[in-house]
């Protein structure tokens, strides 16, 4: 961009080019230039002078003027530089009256040297400018240059802000350029954006030059220019990627009702269709899983569950817990919570690794979820019968009523409000105090029994997990494969898959996917889970065989020593 190197440069050319190239209005540039020149002139000629800078479009220069007021007598020494007495004005041949304003142009350019000399000869004693003129031409040129450069930078920043403020909540693609304290600076072409550490996916790594596709989380107006904040961890990145990959979503036929995500691990989305002929889940999965795989690839292998949305919250929650199967659902509307009862072999699948599956399902549906196995529910019911049945005035029928109202042990009765207990059918209000007193005594015994039950349950779980693989039936082995429940086992056996090896060795995923209740997506998961199970089973078999070998060896040594004894 050409800039004025000296005061003789015609600024019209510069202003026209900047206005055209940078999209800045010429009038805005001129106003900014006049303000800057006025400020520079006051610093150079004196802050007390009444100066005004005006741009002359014909000459292409900024002209400087000083206004001097005619007064009868100068009373303020500070304002003396801006005043002239009527007597002095008459001496100069000026016909003026008190209050009149005289405007003098200040000539500061080299080419105006003759006019400056003539002015100093005639009005030098009034203006007192002669010693100030020297050097201001250079200052004026430098000021004009700095103003135009700064205004250009400001305009570019404003243009970038205006361009990207409307792209908030969109996906952009850029190139990773550098790293600043863990943050990734991404080049978007016309602007740079930042991908903060908190918005990065933990297992993702980038190098300079790598392509970065991210969600525009925010566009902030900062003093150093607009800051575009990106995110790879936002759940909105997931929904926007599906909008890009699935035309039905972009057209509004398929709607993403809810989404939940643990970046880098797993995600769930709930979809519905406004057209009865369009399957929302199928539309998102695509032909042979092409659409969902495109999203998974962009998220670098993050697993995605697509579930159908349902107005019925119980059905919706059951779908959200997929691939686990739910036996019963108990809804607590008051606390917006649900108790889900699942078959014993589905409990770990429903909860997921480190609770991930149930956590995502809760985020997706907005309900508090509590998952229990059928055997655990039976245990709780039996324990409730013993604990609540020990209270005075509580018979078997009242135990059932209390259980239905959410009371699981004596502690719940002891902590309950007496007025609330009085409203439960079958409870004698006159015996509530005695019930609660006895419930407090029962709490210690209940806690001991609960601790014992937890210990026995854990020991049984460890013992079951450590059962020798050779002692398990084929259905029992299949039940240990992640994602395989009782119903799935029945369907697999009917389809000819009688062992874990049959699943792991299946090369035709389409055939495995044809099993009722499986499908191509679950077929991939089952095959991978079966392969992983066989690896873990081999490790366990070797470990248990080694333990048995040591025990046998120890037993043989003891027998030999006993035989030697006299």
Image: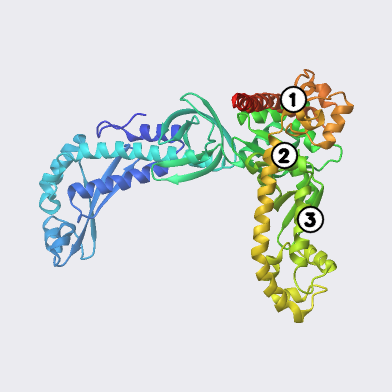
As drawn, the label of residue 349 is: 2
Instruction: Note whether 512 is above or below 466 in the view shown.
Output: above
Q: Nearer the viewer, residue 231 or 98?
A: 231
As drawn, the label of residue 527 is: 1
Q: Residues within 10 Å of mark 1 (few under 14, many from 20)?
A: many
- Rounded to the nearest angstrom, the CA distance separating label 1 from label 3 is 34 Å
In the image, what residue occupies the spot 54% across and 42% down? 217
The furthest residue to the right: 494
Q: In which quadrant of the rendered image does the C terminus lie?
A: top right
Instruction: Note whether 292 is above or below 393 in the view shown.
Output: above
Q: Is residue 97 left or right of residue 546?
A: left
SS at badge 2 = helix
Q: Residues within 10 Å of mark 3 (few under 14, many from 20)?
A: few
Q: Nearer the viewer, residue 242 or 224?
A: 242
Quadrant of res 419: bottom right
Quadrant of res 507: top right
Instruction: Note whether 138 is above or below 128 in the view shown.
Output: above
- Rounded to the nearest angstrom, the CA distance separating label 3 from label 2 is 19 Å
The answer to whether residue 196 is visible is no
Q: Which residue is mark 3?
A: 330
Q: Nearer the viewer, residue 543 or 197?
A: 543
SS at badge 1 = helix
Disc tally is: 3
Picture coordinates of residue 323 (x, y %)? 76, 38
Q: Tags 3 and 2 in contact by the CB under 8 Å rule?
A: no
Q: Tags 1 and 3 in contact by the CB under 8 Å rule?
A: no
Q: Tags 2 and 1 in contact by the CB under 8 Å rule?
A: no
Q: Earlier in the sequence, mark 3 or mark 2?
A: 3
Q: Earlier in the sequence, mark 2 or mark 1?
A: 2
Picture coordinates of residue 228 (x, y %)? 49, 40
């Amino acid at each position: 961009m050409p800039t004025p190197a000296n005061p003789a440069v015609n600024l019209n050319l510069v202003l026209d080019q900047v206005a055209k190239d940078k999209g800045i209005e010429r009038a805005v540039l001129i106003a900014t230039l006049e303000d800057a020149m006025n400020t520079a002139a006051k610093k150079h000629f004196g802050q007390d002078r009444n100066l005004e800078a005006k741009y002359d479009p014909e000459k292409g220069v900024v002209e400087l003027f000083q206004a001097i007021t005619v007064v009868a007598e100068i009373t303020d020494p500070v304002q003396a530089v801006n005043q002239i007495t009527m007597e002095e004005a008459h001496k100069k041949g000026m016909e003026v009256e008190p209050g009149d304003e005289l405007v003098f142009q200040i000539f500061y350019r080299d080419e105006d040297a003759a006019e400056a000399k003539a002015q100093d000869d005639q009005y030098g004693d009034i203006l007192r400018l002669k010693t100030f003129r020297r050097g201001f031409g250079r200052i004026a040129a430098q000021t004009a240059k700095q103003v135009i450069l700064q205004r250009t930078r400001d305009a570019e920043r404003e243009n970038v802000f205006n361009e990207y403020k409307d792209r908030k909540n969109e996906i952009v693609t850029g190139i990773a350029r550098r790293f600043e304290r863990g943050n990734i600076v991404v080049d978007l072409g016309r602007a740079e954006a930042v991908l903060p550490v908190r918005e990065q996916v933990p297992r993702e790594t980038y190098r300079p030059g790598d392509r970065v596709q991210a969600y525009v989380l925010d566009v902030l107006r900062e003093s150093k220019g607009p800051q575009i904040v990106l995110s790879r961890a936002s759940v909105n990145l997931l929904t926007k990627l599906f909008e890009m990959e699935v035309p039905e979503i972009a057209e509004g036929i398929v709607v993403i009702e809810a989404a939940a995500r643990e970046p880098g691990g797993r995600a769930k989305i709930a979809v519905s269709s406004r057209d009865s002929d369009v399957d929302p889940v199928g539309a998102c999965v695509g032909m042979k899983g092409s659409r969902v795989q495109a999203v998974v690839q962009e998220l670098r292998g993050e697993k995605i569950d697509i579930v159908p949305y349902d107005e019925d919250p119980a059905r919706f929650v059951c779908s959200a817990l997929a691939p686990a199967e739910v036996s019963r659902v108990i809804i607590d509307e008051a606390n917006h919570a649900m108790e889900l009862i699942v078959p014993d072999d589905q409990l770990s699948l429903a909860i997921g690794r480190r609770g991930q599956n149930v956590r995502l399902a809760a985020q997706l549906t907005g309900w508090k979820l509590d998952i229990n196995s059928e055997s655990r529910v039976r245990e709780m019911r039996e324990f409730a019968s013993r604990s609540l049945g020990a209270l005075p005035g509580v018979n078997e029928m009242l135990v059932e009523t209390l259980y239905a109202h959410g009371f699981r042990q004596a502690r719940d009765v002891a902590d309950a409000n007496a007025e609330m207990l009085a409203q439960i059918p079958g409870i004698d209000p006159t015996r509530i105090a005695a019930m609660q007193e006895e419930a407090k005594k029962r709490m210690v015994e209940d806690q001991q029994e609960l601790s014992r039950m937890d210990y026995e349950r854990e020991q049984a779980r460890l013992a079951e997990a450590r059962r020798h693989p050779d002692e398990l039936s084929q259905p029992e082995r299949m039940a240990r494969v992640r994602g395989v429940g009782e119903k799935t086992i029945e369907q697999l056996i009917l389809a000819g898959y009688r062992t874990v090896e049959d699943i792991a060795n299946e090369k035709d995923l389409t055939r495995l996917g044809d099993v009722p209740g499986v499908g191509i997506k679950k077929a991939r998961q089952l095959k991978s889970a079966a392969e992983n199970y066989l690896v873990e089973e081999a490790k366990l078999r070797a470990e248990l065989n080694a333990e048995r070998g040591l025990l046998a060896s120890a037993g043989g040594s003891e027998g030999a020593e006993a035989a030697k004894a006299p």
